[in-house]
Every structure is written in structure tokens, then in C-alpha cells.
């Protein structure tokens, strides 16, 4: 499935409304496929049931510009996937840029480096964007632009 609307249509065609509303994974995926619609009503209750719910709620907060809410949600979270490193990298970059915290900038760089330097991710779009973000945060702008330009 290549996009949210297509995935949502497939979900709607495959499962009746009652099941979509009662099944935690289907409720979670419906929120994701609708771009966060009803995120605050659905995702908080799923955080302990579906690991991706916490990440998706943090992404929802980031999209709204609610950096503090995203940071608080992810405060004790241990990154264990490229997606979680990218979310934590984004949160720390936002905080570092807003507050001037060098510690947060360095944390952000480390998260982006994990993804950008990973053999499994370095040639993917998220991997390259992570590497470019790390280079940008290091103020290595020429290399950051070169890596950004390599993403097609």
C-alpha cells in the first residue's frame, strides 16, 4: 500500500465498522492512515498495547508544533528502530534549536547518525535525510546539501 488513503480504503473494504472500532490495531492504523485524525482520542489508550502508538502520538505532537508534549511523551523512551531514532532526533533538534542547548543538538546528531550510518538504512531516503540532518546540525552545510541533493 503506497499511501494512507489507499490503505484506509483497503482497511474499510476488508473489515466491518464494528471490528474496526473494537480492534486496537485497526483503530491505531485508522488514525495513522487518516493522518492523525482522532489521534488524541485513540492513541493514548494504545501506548501500552501497540509500541508504534507512542511514536505516532509523538509524531502527531511534532506536526502540531507541540514539542514539549512530544518530548515529555518520549522522555524515558529507548530508541530501538530507525523510526524511533528519527523521532527522538527531531525532538532533540527542535529543543536544541529553541533553547540553544548544545546537549540536545548532540543527542539529535547521535540519533540521526545511528540511522544515517546504518548499513541497512544508509541508502534509503530516511537514512540519507538523517545523515543530512546530522551534517546540518554539525554546521557542515556543504556536505548536508550534497546529501540532501542525493535524495530523489
Image (cartoon, helix red, strand yellow):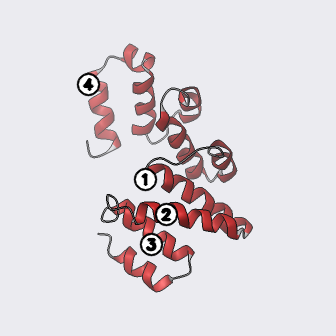
Q: Nearer the viewer, residue 101 or 29?
A: 101
Measured in 3D between alpha carbons, the distance from the residue under mark 4 to the one under mark 3, in whole angstroms, is 40 Å
Q: How far apart are marks 1 and 3 (CA)?
A: 15 Å
Q: How far separated are the C-alphas under marks 2 and 3?
A: 9 Å
Residue 77: quarter of image: top right
First of labels 4, 2 by sequence position? 4
Q: Which residue is drawn at 45% across and 50% down?
A: 83
Residue 132's label in the rendered image is 3
Residues packed near mark 2 inside 10 Å, few (<14), some (14 to 19) or many (20 plus):
many
Q: In this view, does 49 lie above or below 136?
A: above
- On screen, 90 above or below 32? below
Q: Nearer the viewer, residue 139 or 65?
A: 139
Label 2 to label 1: alpha-carbon separation: 9 Å
Q: Is mark 2 on a helix, strand or loop?
A: helix
How far across and down, in percent of the image, does residue 148 sit?
39, 74
Label 4 sits on a secondary structure element that is helix
Q: Which residue is drawn at 48% across and 30% down?
A: 50
Q: Residue 13 carries which label?
A: 4
Tell which tag, 4 or 1, sits nearer the viewer.
Answer: 1
Q: Nearer the viewer, residue 114 or 22?
A: 114
Q: In this view, does 117 lie above or below 86?
A: below
Residue 18 occupies quadrant:
top left
Q: Which of marks 2 and 3 is nearer the N terminus?
A: 2
Residue 82 is tagged as: 1
Which residue lies under the disc numbered 2?
112
Q: Image point 41% across, 26% down: which residue?
A: 25
Amino acid at each position: 500500500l503506497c499511501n494512507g488513503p489507499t490503505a484506509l480504503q483497503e482497511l474499510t473494504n476488508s473489515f466491518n465498522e464494528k471490528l474496526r472500532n473494537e480492534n486496537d490495531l485497526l483503530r491505531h492504523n485508522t488514525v495513522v492512515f487518516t493522518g492523525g485524525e482522532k489521534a488524541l482520542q485513540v492513541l493514548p489508550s494504545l501506548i501500552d498495547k501497540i509500541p508504534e502508538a507512542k511514536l505516532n502520538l509523538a509524531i502527531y505532537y511534532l506536526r502540531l508544533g507541540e514539542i514539549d508534549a512530544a518530548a515529555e511523551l518520549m522522555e524515558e523512551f529507548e530508541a530501538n528502530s530507525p523510526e524511533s531514532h528519527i523521532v527522538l532526533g527531531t525532538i532533540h533538534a527542535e529543543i536544541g534549536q529553541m533553547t540553544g542547548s548544545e546537549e540536545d543538538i548532540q543527542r539529535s546528531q547521535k540519533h540521526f547518525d545511528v540511522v544515517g550510518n546504518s548499513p541497512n538504512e544508509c541508502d534509503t531516503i530516511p537514512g540519507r535525510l538523517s545523515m543530512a540532518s546530522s551534517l546540518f546540525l554539525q554546521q557542515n552545510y556543504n556536505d548536508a546539501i550534497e546529501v540532501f541533493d542525493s535524495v530523489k
